[in-house]
Each structure stands twice: as structure tokens, then as C-alpha cells.
Image (tube, helix red, strand yellow):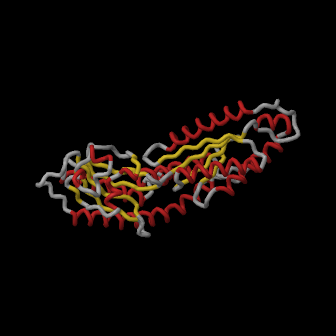
Amino acid sequence: MTVAETAESSAAHLTTKPGSGLFSQASMRVVAELNRRHVDMTWSVSRVDHGHQVHLHVAGDIFAAGTTVEWDDTLCKRMLAGGAHIVPDTMADSNYADSALVEHIRGYAGMPITNPDGETFGVLCGLRRDPLPGDLDVDVEMLGLLGGLLSDLLATARLVDASASKEQSALIQAQTDHLTGLTNRRGWDLALRQAELAVSSYGDHVTVVVMDIDRLKHVNDTEGHAVGDDMLRDAARVLRELVRRDDVVARVGGDEFAILFIGLGDDEATARLGQLRAELDNAEVAASLGMATATQAIELMSLVSAADQRMYVDKRQRRAARVSPEPSGGGRVG
């Protein structure tokens, strides 16, 4: 079987990472059961990351899965800071009353979900528009047990996925662009499928950067394809030196490159983009860049499209800023 055939036959395997699927299924069972017991409350397993709370798995009608809110505004932050786990009336509790959400959420229940290192992964929480009535008995011990079990399962799921990722990463890396040595388009598509699971199951922060070499055709036509190929190799070297071990950098078209970052916050991603621009300038590679970030369950091809659109905006701005006529040769142009 050829490498291409191996990649094709393994695509389905890459879309069903065992650990993330296990955590998602367990989370949905937990929130569904809590919603069955307390039907007028919306229950959620959420992720807290880079200043946001993303509701991953939801049962109820107050908000939908994928809803993202500023962490500082949340009731869950106040619970983790020492507030009660069960709050009959948020407006009457001094630990919660300063949140803008109390105008809309009067009843609250929450327990932390922790990462293996003890840091907060997210929260198992229940929300009610009205105060909790006296006969609505939310069992704090059961809620704590469920939060602990989800924490334990999260640790196991991450280990299972880490083991599976070694095989998956090897398969992705086997899809190589011969000119640059980077991952090719087939490997990029496989990496996107894998990353979608990290977003939908765990709420991992995913950033896509799209890069297009400016006027590569002009360079090929005026200076020769050997010079154009050197430009592509230089661009690949800059990208390779910028990324971390688990990031994916690919040549996805003739003059098009892409990077997939997992776990970078917005500020970190913006800083990386600025660093990339500077390193490309140092290497005398003129390129247009676009970036987009997701923290909720979406098709990552939509994220790529958003980054692509921003790259074309950058390209138009760079073209408009160019004041000198095109040279006929003698150097790389941008």
C-alpha cells in the first residue's frame, strides 16, 4: 500500500480519537442526567482557557453548546474563588451579586473539573433563570463526585489521546512536500480533522495562520524557477523554526503555506504572527498573512477560510502600500 493509500484509509481513524470521544460521551451523559433530575436548570461541562469559558457539552435551554463568555463575568469564577457550590439566589449572595449575570441567572450550582496537574480545566455547572426553590434539592456531594469523576476521566482521556497522537502525527508527517520538506496538503487536511476533535471535546484553543508568498509568479518569470524555489525553501525554514514540536506547518499550494497552533491564547498568537512577519522580512521573503482562532466546536475549514480572507485583506493592503514600480530582476520583491 502506498503512503497516499495509507493516509486515505486512515482518515476515518483520525476523526475518532478514542480519548476525546470518551470524555465527550461521559460529559453528555452527566449533563443529560442532571437536566433530567432538575429539568428547569441548564447543565454544562465547560472549559476555562485564556480568559474565556466555553460551554462544551450542554443540556438545557438557557444557552447552547459552543457558547463562549468572558471568564471574569462568570458565576463559575466566583465559585472557584471560594463562593458556595450551591447558590439558591445569586443576587442575595455577596460572593456572586457583583456579576452582571445575576440579572439573568438567579440559581447556580457548580463544581470544578481539574487537569492532571491540579490546575482548573473547567466547571460542571447548573444555571437557573429564577432562584432555586426550597424543594429543588441539588445534591452537593453528588455534584462533587461527578466533578471528580470527570476530572479522573479527563486525565485518562488525555493519556489515551497522547498515545494515539503519536501514530497520527507520524502519519501526518509522512505526507511530505518534496520541495520544502513540510507537511503537504493531504497531511494538512488530516491534521485539521484531528484538531477539530480537540476543539469540540476539550475546548482547546486552535489558531490557523495562512501565508501566501507575494508575487512568486513574477519572480519565477523574471529570475527563474530556481530563485522561486529558493524563496519557497526560505519561507519553509522560517516557518519550521517558528513552530513548536506539536504544531503543524504545511505547504498547501504552490505559493501557499499554513500553520496550525493548538493551545495558544489570542495574545500569544498575535505575538507569533508579528514574529513571523519579522523573520520573513529578515529572510527577504515577501508574504501576506492571515490568522483566525477558534475556541468552540466548528468545522476548521471555516477557520481556514476566515484566515484566508484576512490574508487577502493583508495582500491588498501590502499591494496598495507598494510605491515603487516592479523591478525586472536582481532581488526579491515584496
Q: Is residue 198 left or right of residue 275?
A: left
222 up-or-down from 68: above or below: above
Residue drawn at 47 percent across, 54 percent down: 50
Residue 246 in picture, x, y percent from top left:
58, 59
Please identify the residue farthest to the left as the structure is shown: 135
User: Depth check: 191 or 75 in front?
Assistant: 75
User: Depth check: 233 or 141 in front?
Assistant: 141
Residue 191 in picture, x, y percent from top left:
55, 51
Image quarter in which the N terminus is found: bottom right
* Residue 26 in view here: no
Total marks placed: 0
Please identify the residue farthest to the bottom as the structure is shown: 117
* Residue 288 in view here: yes
- Place residue 326 in its image quadrant: top right
Image quarter in which the C terminus is found: top right
Residue 303 in picture, x, y percent from top left:
52, 42
Q: Is residue 147 left or right of residue 248?
A: left
User: Depth check: 156 or 329 in front?
Assistant: 329
Residue 69 in picture, x, y percent from top left:
39, 47
Residue drawn at 33 percent across, 58 percent down: 78
Q: Is residue 306 left or right of residue 329?
A: left
- Place residue 144 in its image quadrant: bottom left
User: Depth check: 152 or 251 in front?
Assistant: 152
Residue drawn at 54 percent across, 54 percent down: 264
